[in-house]
């Protein structure tokens, strides 16, 4: 008997809110885990992914906002885990950083990072996780256009919170300077991350649907 996943097009209506993360653990293993333990495991995996992506971090010039892989990790985690688990992963990430673990970009930590000039982006990650996770539950991630739309909305939300925060905390209310340093330099970088995250989901759903024993 092969270990497989149910085909996506055969899911009953009440299960269509499942995300791709629900199918990445083989059924035979999943059935041995208590539901809460399984959710906790996925949340921990999501937090670990965000931490690893935050390790990709570098500054250009004197810009206080670093180039990082965090956005990619946040969007990927939210899309894979859905609303509640995506938000939980991000909140756990923030809690670890505030508690003193060097999980933030440039291996920083502490409440002062969250309250500092770039803290708005971290808050934006939480809100974006909620939105992207919910859109994934609604099935946006199952097509390339839907996945791009979800990731784009998530990215816009992050900047909508992060840039004004940077303006008022970092630049004394100078919004133009915040846009110049906290938005414009990152558009191409984030477009690449967005495209990679968006492409990952339709590919993952295709893979899930093609696993042996799913037919």
Image (cartoon, rainbow, N blue to C red):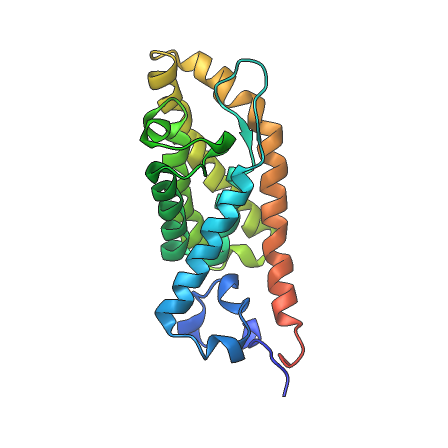
Tell me where residue 194 appears, x and y as whole percent.
Answer: 58, 41
Tell me, yes or no, if residue 150 can be seen here.
Answer: no
Foreground pick, 94 / 9: 94
Image location (x, y in percent) of residue 110: 35, 32
- Position of the C terminus, as image quadrant, is bottom right
Estimate the x, y position of residue 8 in percent, counting from the top left. Answer: 55, 71
Identify the residue at image location x=39%, y=54%.
83
Q: Position of residue 176 (x, y in %)?
A: 44, 13
Residue 40 vertical placement versus 177 (above, below): below
Q: Nearer the viewer, residue 1 or 213?
A: 1
Q: For the point 59% across and 19% down, which residue is it?
A: 60
Q: Residue furthest bottom?
A: 1
* Residue drawn at point x = 43 percent, y = 65 percent: 17
Left or right? Give the position of 193 relative to 88: right
Quarter placement of the N terminus: bottom right
Q: Residue at x 53, y 80 (%)?
A: 28
């Amino acid at each position: 008997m092969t270990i497989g996943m149910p085909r996506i097009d055969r899911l009953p209506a009440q299960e269509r809110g499942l995300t791709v993360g629900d199918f990445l653990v083989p059924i035979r293993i999943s059935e041995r885990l208590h539901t809460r333990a399984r959710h906790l495991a996925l949340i921990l995996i999501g937090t670990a992914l965000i931490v690893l992506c935050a390790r990709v971090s570098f500054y250009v010039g004197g810009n206080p906002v670093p180039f990082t892989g965090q956005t990619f990790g946040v969007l990927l985690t939210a899309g894979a885990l859905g609303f509640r688990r995506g938000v939980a992963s991000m909140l756990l990430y923030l809690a670890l950083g505030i508690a003193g673990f060097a999980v933030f970009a440039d291996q920083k930590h502490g409440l002062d990072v969250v309250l500092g000039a770039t803290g708005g982006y971290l808050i934006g990650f939480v809100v974006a996780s909620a939105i992207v996770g919910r859109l994934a539950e609604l099935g946006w991630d199952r097509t390339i256009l839907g996945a791009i739309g979800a990731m784009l909305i998530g990215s816009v939300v992050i900047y909508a919170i992060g840039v004004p925060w940077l303006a008022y905390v970092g630049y004394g209310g100078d919004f133009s300077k915040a846009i110049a340093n906290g938005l414009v330099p990152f558009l191409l970088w984030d477009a690449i991350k967005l495209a990679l995250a968006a492409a990952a989901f339709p590919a993952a759903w295709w893979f899930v649907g093609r696993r042996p024993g799913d037919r």
